Image (spheres, rainbow, N blue to C red):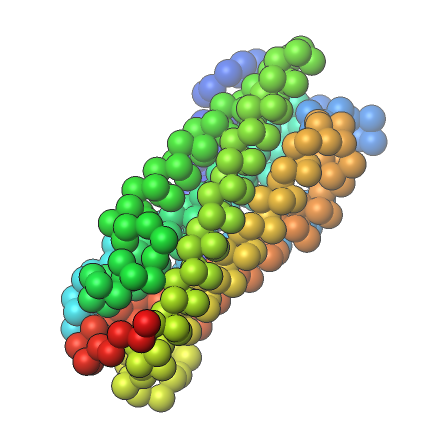
Amino acid sequence: MYCTLKTSLILIFLVTSTAGKPSEMRLENSLPRTADTQYLGGYKPSQTLAVIAALLWALSPHFYIFLALGLIRCSDWWRCGRPKFMMSLIMGMYACCTGYTLRTLYIRFPQSEVIFVAMNEVILLAPCLFYIVTYVLFSRILSTFDLEVAQRCLPIRPSRITPIFVGTTLLFAVGEAVGVALTAVSGSTVQNVGNKVALLSIGFQFFFVELFMLVLFIFRRRMRREFPELWHYNDAPRFTFWGRTPIAWKPVFYILAITSTVLLARSVYRIVEFSLGQDGYLMQHEVFLYACDALPVWLAMSVYCFVWPTRALGSRPSQIPLVHHA
């Protein structure tokens, strides 16, 4: 973990020292930090909170790597289809760690537009990788059932789950990135345009997360009604945390519902934050950033530390006889 943070710091220093205006960077490095120092964000962030957040976000991916390489047998890894999509979860964790590491550098260089924009971009966009993991994992769970089951229990075709939700996530992430970049440009008009672009992108993202949760709800309702034998199917060994053995699909399904709820709540916070503008109450009080974004998202995604989700992809409930209930 220390090596990862040290490497991130070195890379960030190399980028910020060679990009933009090197003479201003040297001047800022020599300026003392006083109470009169002007920060681009309008306030001085807490060094302690930023360091704690960076350490927590660095801790979880290391635990994931230990879990994937140490606790899961190679046979389980191959039998589960070598789920490379779970790398998005680890990459998202490292990205969040980088974002809050940049926040500590922003305290050091409060007038650096490079660090300020990069910090906001990474903190805002890193959770998009968590959205992608959630969508793809649900699609993989669907693949363990017969096609007939998935078609009857879903309001849309199973093959369209990943393209629709992952594609829109990537599209709106670009919109958020453009919007946040424009908010750092001098001039109130350009900043207002950037704020509206980011707000619109987050609003559409919120809509699709809400739509995904509706899909989960419909799937659960139809599965219990039409295929109760699959809903109550569980021939996996006794459930254990940090285990190697396969687990039933329902615990992972409920975890998906929980993480989707947290991501939905985060979107609500971001919508309110950007709707209030750069000088709004939420934007000027960082306690909301940690209470409504960093902490709940970290807790939700760290649940996978205890329940490695691909363990549910090894069982095949489609192998049991189906009795359709009209």
Q: Is residue 19 left or right of 88 when viewed as pictured?
A: right
Residue depicted at x 32% and y 72%: 326
Q: Using the rendered image of the protein, determine whether residue 221 is visible from the camera's viewpoint.
A: yes
Q: Is residue 33 left or right of residue 57?
A: right
In the image, is 301 to the left or to the right of 312?
A: right
Which residue is farthest right?
35
- Quadrant of the image for the N terminus? bottom left
**Residue that extends furthest to the bottom in the rendered view of this protein:** 238
For the residue pair 149 and 1, the one nearer the viewer reads as: 149
From the viewer's perspective, is residue 103 above or below residue 188? below
Measured as percent of width and height from the top left, residue 201 is found at: 52, 31
Quarter of the image for residue 66 reads: bottom left
In the rendered image, the residue lying farthest to the front is 326
The residue under the point 35% across, 78% down is 228
The x, y position of residue 154, in whole percent, is: 34, 57
Residue 296 quadrant? bottom right
Q: In the rendered view, would you say 141 is above or below 55? A: below
Q: Is residue 109 left or right of residue 259?
A: right
- Residue at 66% x, 23% y is 111
Q: Is residue 44 visible?
A: no
Q: Position of residue 179 (x, y in %)?
A: 54, 24
Residue toward you, 169 or 177? 169
Residue lying at 82% horizontally and 26% vertically, measured from the top left: 36
